[in-house]
């Protein structure tokens, strides 16, 4: 009988989150997943809070619960998640359509066929997201009233 080779996951959760040797693309993937889940959670909370209006409960009136500084910061986090998720989604669409994968060559390890195109696109997306966050942060964090 053939022996089955097992590889234990010794890294646990850090192995999934850390990325390690995979580089910036792995971190972009993890952040895309986390921001997607965060936006979904916000959407579900938004539906609940909006549906409370049918019962006559208005949580966002002036001086209400949602005008506290903690919720202003939460709005900024939702904006940050949306900005990153949207821009990274555009990048992923470009990659899936074949517009950002580079010239096809024979696959030889290490597979660096598209790093010359995809990585600069990722960096450009991150710079654009940082610009959006700076502009949004100026507005959301009440620096501009």
Image (tube, rainbow, N blue to C red):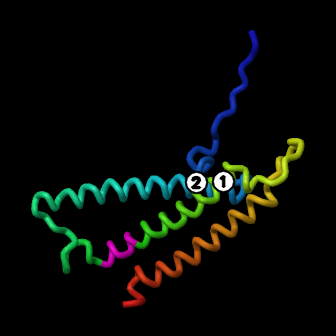
Give residue 50's position: percent from left, percent from top.
23, 60
Instruction: Indicate whether residue 71 is drawn in magenta.
Output: yes
Is there CB contact under 8 Å for labels 1 and 2? yes
Q: Is residue 55 left or right of residue 145?
A: left
* Quadrant the N terminus occupies: top right
Looking at this view, is 67 or 50 the one in front? 50
Question: Which residues make up the magenta segment?
Answer: 69-75
Looking at this view, is 5 or 62 the one in front? 62
Crowdedness near tag 1: few (<14), some (14–19) or many (≥20) residues, C-alpha within 10 Å: some
Crowdedness near tag 2: few (<14), some (14–19) or many (≥20) residues, C-alpha within 10 Å: some
**In the image, what residue occupies the spot 58% across and 44% down?**
12
**In the image, what residue occupies the spot 81% across and 54% down?**
102
Rendered position, 67 above or below 38:
below
Give residue 19's position: percent from left, percent from top.
66, 53
**In the image, what residue occupies the spot 74% across and 58% down?**
118
Rendered position, 110 above or below 7:
below
Q: CA distance from mark 1 to mark 2?
A: 6 Å
Q: Is residue 53 left or right of residue 109?
A: left
Query: What main secondary structure does the magenta stretch of the protein show?
Result: helix
**In the image, what residue occupies the spot 69% across and 59% down?**
24
Describe the element under mark 2 as helix, strand or loop. Answer: helix
Q: Quadrant location of residue 60? A: bottom left
Describe the element under mark 1 as helix, strand or loop. Answer: helix
Q: Is residue 134 left or right of residue 75?
A: right
Instruction: Indicate whether residue 73 is drawn in magenta.
Output: yes
Residue with the mark numbered 1 = 26
Q: Is residue 36 left or right of residue 43?
A: right
Residue with the mark numbered 2 = 30
Residue 139 circle label: none
């Amino acid at each position: 009988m053939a022996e089955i080779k097992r590889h234990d996951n010794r890294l646990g959760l850090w192995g999934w989150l850390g990325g390690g040797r995979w580089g910036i693309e792995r971190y972009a993937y993890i952040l895309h997943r986390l921001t997607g889940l965060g936006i979904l959670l916000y959407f579900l909370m938004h539906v609940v809070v909006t549906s409370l209006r049918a019962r006559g409960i208005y949580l966002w009136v002036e001086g209400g619960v949602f005008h506290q500084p903690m919720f202003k910061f939460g709005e900024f986090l939702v904006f940050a998640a949306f900005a990153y998720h949207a821009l990274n989604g555009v990048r992923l669409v470009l990659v899936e359509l074949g517009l950002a994968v580079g010239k096809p060559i024979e696959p030889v390890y290490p597979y660096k066929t598209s790093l010359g195109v995809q990585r600069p696109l990722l960096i450009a997306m991150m710079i654009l997201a940082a610009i959006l966050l700076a502009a949004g942060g100026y507005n959301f964090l009440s620096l501009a009233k």
